[in-house]
Amino acid sequence: MNKKMHIDTHCVLEYDGKNFSQPHILPIYATSSFVMESFEHGEAVFTGQKQGQVYGRYGNPTVDEVAAKIAALESHGMEKQAFGLMTSSGMSAISTLLQSLLQKGDAILTQEDLYGGTTELFKSVFPAMGIRTFFTDLKDISALEVLIKNNPDIKVLYFETPSNPTCSCLDIKALAEFSKKNGLASIVDNTFCTPVIQQPLQLGVDFVIHSTTKYLNGHGNSIAGIIVGIDEARKPAIWKTLKLMGGTCNPFDAWLVHIGMKTLGLRMEKHSSNAMSLATYLENHAKVSKVNYVGLKSHESFETASSQMRLPGGMLSFEVDGGYEAAKKCINSLSLAKYAPTLGDVNTLVLHPRTSSHLNVDPAISEKNGITQGLIRVSVGIEATDDILSDFENALNSI
Ligand SMILES: *Cc1c(COP(=O)(O)O)cnc(C)c1O
């Protein structure tokens, strides 16, 4: 330190980074910008000749490390290494990626049972930008071929598997092939599975997005998202959109995802085995008329799920006899499982779709898709199996 400077200046001075060893755990870089070593270094970094951070919205070491880690997980076992860009939320990942891929006049092809926020984005925000969306059944590929022939403005295929909350699955490989054949960019929202369970890039998909808010963080204490792509050549355009639309992820939220991911493998195993136990229990319960879980042979998507998922995952839904009143009683009688509108948490969480996520969906369409008044969604946690089962046993006895 320069002893000649005033005490007020000393208050403002920054550390020089020369006094400590490499930290064991990724640090949180809470800084909005980065110091250039010299004029020349600044010029080289700004012109892209040298790697380096410039300004927090353009990139941050904590955020970039976590993005690279998730990208490595999504492309694990592949020859090519995927790239990743973290965003301020899952919705930001979706809107940033699509804004970068699409122009006015282009259209999106997707399924009817998408995540509610995504449906609303496509229906009520994108049209004003001149981007249309076709919502249809993505299981019928021959019908998709006809739709594509009649609508050459479709440029992107966007889908989720398993779907929320009925866990209906789509054949990723077949849809990736269909996209390639028709020159569409394909995107999968892999939030429900995580790369530990399902790797859409390996099956030929171009992009994966996540709400890292859910399983990747796993502890319900961070909101963030990520865009992962397999073709590095597409990164600069997406990065530019992210940088200029400003949906940047902050380093603290990224760091929480980083810490959460250390136990991702363990968590997904336990979520899956607990969900399998609960689904089996519910399937044999007299007051339950239906259980939607991809681990059950009775589920319509059992075959598709088994062919592309390593584990059945932690999401299920079930229908209690007695509709709205019975679902209300059941949810109010649970004590370990909490009613919270999120998923992928270590704690068991429940949701009543018809009075929450599907409130704005036409009731007739919900009924048709199996989202009845008696349907309860469960994000099965990693608590001891017996405690989860007795919680649901007590709750079902109250009906
Ligand atoms: C939660 C969720 C999103 C949106 O993510 P946010 O982090 O809340 O913006 C998108 N897709 C799926 C499947 C989700 O569960």
Image (spheres, helix red, strand yellow):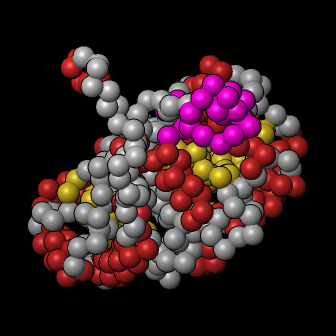
Q: Please indicate, yes or no, whether residue 274 appears anywhere in the rendered image.
A: yes
Quadrant of the rendering where the N terminus is positioned: top left
Image height of 125 relative to 179, above or below? above
Q: Nearer the viewer, residue 142 or 69?
A: 69
Find the residue positioned furthest to the front. Answer: 4
- Relative image position of residue 138 (x, y in whole percent): 68, 55
Most common SS among magenta residues: loop
Q: Nearer the viewer, residue 140 or 373?
A: 140
* Direction from residue 235 to residue 116 in the image, left or right: left
Query: Does the magenta portion include 358?
Result: no
Residue at the spot x=88%, y=43% of the render? 149
Quadrant of the rendering where the C terminus is positioned: bottom left
Q: Which residues are magenta?
A: 37-60
* Direction from residue 381 to residue 357 in the image, left or right: right
* Direction from residue 34 to residue 379 in the image, left or right: left
Residue at the spot x=27%, y=25% of the render? 3
